[in-house]
């Protein structure tokens, strides 16, 4: 059979060069952030996902009161 397909998560990390797209930090713990929240119809697709560090991701959800 063919080579194992990369997960969407891994594709996002690679596309974003394992770098937080909010603060630019590298070599840190990273997360996937949904641009349009899943609760509002956002999908797990490359065009709706972005790499953020855990700190930026947590801060965003606290500020906007959105669970993740």
Image (cartoon, rainbow, N blue to C red):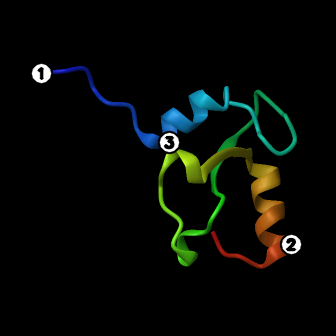
Between the C-alphas of marks 1 and 3, the distance is 22 Å
Between the C-alphas of marks 3 and 2, the distance is 24 Å
Location of residue 52 in the rendering, given as x and y in whole percent from the top left corner: 73, 46
Q: Could you tell me which quadrant the C terminus lies in?
A: bottom right
Out of 13 and 46, give the one closest to the viewer.
Answer: 46
| Residue at x-position 56% and y-position 48% | 47
> Could you tell which of marks 2 and 1 lies nearer the N-terminus?
1
Q: Which residue is mark 1?
A: 1
| Residue at x-position 71% and y-position 76% | 66
Between the C-alphas of marks 2 and 1, the distance is 47 Å
Disc 3: CA contacts within 10 A as few (<14), some (14-19) or many (>=20):
some
> Could you tell which of marks 1 and 3 lies nearer the N-terminus?
1
| Residue 3 falls left or right of residue 12 | left
Q: In the rendering, which numbered label is found on residue 63? A: 2
> Could you tell which of marks 3 and 2 lies nearer the N-terminus?
3
Q: Which residue is mark 3?
A: 9
| Residue at x-position 60% and y-position 30% | 15
Contact flag, marks 1 and 3 (Cβ < 8 Å): no
Location of residue 34 in the rendering, given as x and y in whole percent from the top left corner: 62, 58
| Residue 24 falls left or right of residue 29 | right
Contact flag, marks 2 and 1 (Cβ < 8 Å): no
Residue 5 image-quadrant placement: top left
| Residue 23 falls left or right of residue 33 | right
Out of 67 and 11, give the one closest to the viewer.
Answer: 11
Q: Secondary structure at mark 2?
A: helix
């Amino acid at each position: 059979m063919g080579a194992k397909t990369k997960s969407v998560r891994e594709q996002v990390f690679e596309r974003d060069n394992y770098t937080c797209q909010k603060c630019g930090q590298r070599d840190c713990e990273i997360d996937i952030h949904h641009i349009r929240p899943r609760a509002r119809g956002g999908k797990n697709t490359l065009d709706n996902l972005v790499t953020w560090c855990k700190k930026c991701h947590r801060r965003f959800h606290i500020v906007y009161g959105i669970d993740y």
